[in-house]
Amino acid sequence: MRLSLFSLGAALLPSLALGAEWGSGDRGKVPPGFLTTKGTNFRLDNKNFAFVGSNSYWLPLLTTKADVDLTLKDARKAGIKVMRTWGFNAINATELPTALATDLTYYQVWNGTKFNMNYGKQGLERMDYVVKAAEKAGVKLILAFTNNWGGYGGMDLYVQWIRPDSRYHDAFYTDPAIIAEYQRYVKIIVNRYKDSPAIAAWELMNEARCLGDLPAGPNCPGKRLLTKWYRQQSDYIRKLDPYHLITTGGEGHFFWDNPPKFWSNGELVSDYNYNGQAGEDFEEDLTLPNIDFGTYHIYVYSWYPQLIYAGSNFSAYEWGLQWIQQHADAAKKKGKPVILEEFGVPTYQDKLAFYPGWVQKALDTNHGIMPWQYGQLGLTESGGNRVIKYADAIIDGASPNDTNTFYKNQTDIWSIFTRAAKIQDARSR
């Protein structure tokens, strides 16, 4: 989603007990409690691991251990087995006084061509507790290393500090100095948590594209530059950590020779989600040896606003079903699992209309299912009211609501996912 994851005392890798399972690629025998894959299934300790998960980017931004514990406990009670969250938050040095004053969690501070790392109480100590609490609650974490978008300090921050002469977003994928700083950050995070069974997977980036808040340059769209970057970074992480799963965090754009077309403002246009202009190639990316499973997202209202109007023959609901099936077919063909990793529609009525069918289609096609985003009630920090950053706020004890958020008291929506979680549980035995 575009927005305006172990016990720390463990010094040794968990022993390779009898029953440890072979991982995908060349991962070897995976330690007990570590997620792995077999064909198109996720596996945990020699059993299939089918799951409903969710997203909670704000989890490490909470300032109290009690609220972290409450969130993970309630999520697990609801049937959530996997939670995806941001393993990043970077700020400019000019933002530091405000961050300190507001108790904002931050990991990187930029004031030159190299970031400074925050290992302290407002930094990695908070992530340490999230990972520890997740292990205790029985929830596994997907940690994303950076963001395609500017929210919470994404990849354009690297570009702006290291390559201020560059006008293009995709310099991030090719500039050696930028890649070195990204890898320096990745190494810190991976080495800190690589012994933890609470980590489900490392994620290279949230929603990588050729463009972001900066425009795309001429060498990215339609050039499979992202595939090359995915290969480079997943190979790098595999050398750091032979056991945890690795994925892209992409939206699942295709790169078809004959992409669909549609009429927009009187012009027949090629569909951005299928024509390679975003930079991804979902099918090709799945063939990479150290990409263990595929991810994709659904935001029909954001992606096709020109087609959604009164009297239109375009069905956002049917498009979503088609998108799910296309990714299921691609993953099956490549022999790897797939997660519908984010999906959302803005209104309560559309959630009720769309989610049952979309979730059932995902269940029928062997998906991991992770709606955007999980909402927590009963948070107590700052009296239950706190501005985090931007417009993100805890209000009356409720976690940030970006209109896609679903909460336990929205029983019609909540029950769609708790029902699916029970079905997935039954498949995991």
Image (tube, rainbow, N blue to C red):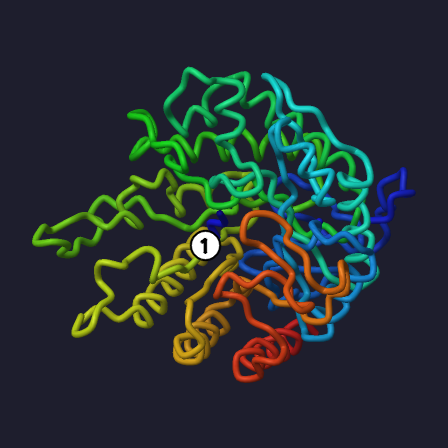
* Residue 19 in view here: no
Near-viewer residue (266 or 39): 266
Q: Position of residue 132 (x, y in %)?
A: 82, 52
Q: Residues within 10 Å of mark 1 (few under 14, many from 20)?
A: many
Secondary structure category for the residue under label 1: strand
Taking depth in this image into account, of 272 and 422 the one nearest to the observer is 272
Q: Which residue is mark 1?
A: 296
**Residue 133 in the figure: left or right of residue 378:** right
User: Does residue 180 appear anywhere in the picture?
Assistant: yes
From the viewer's perspective, is 257 left or right of 135?
left
- The quarter holding residue 393 reads bottom right
How many discs mark residues in the rendered view? 1
**Where residue 118 sits: x, y (%)?**
75, 32
Residue at far left of view: 266
Residue occupying image coordinates x 53% and y 41%:
147
Residue 389 screen position, x and y as percent: 60, 47
Q: Is residue 281 above or below residue 178?
A: below
| Quadrant where the image shows the C terminus | bottom right
Q: Position of residue 330 (x, y in %)?
A: 40, 55
- Residue nearer the viewer, 74 or 14: 74
Identify the residue shown where x is 34% and y is 32%. Answer: 215
- On the rendered structure, is 61 left or right of 287? right
Residue 119 versus residue 252 in the image, above or below: above
Q: Residue at x 62, y 28 (%)?
A: 94
Give the amino acid at mark 1.
Tyr
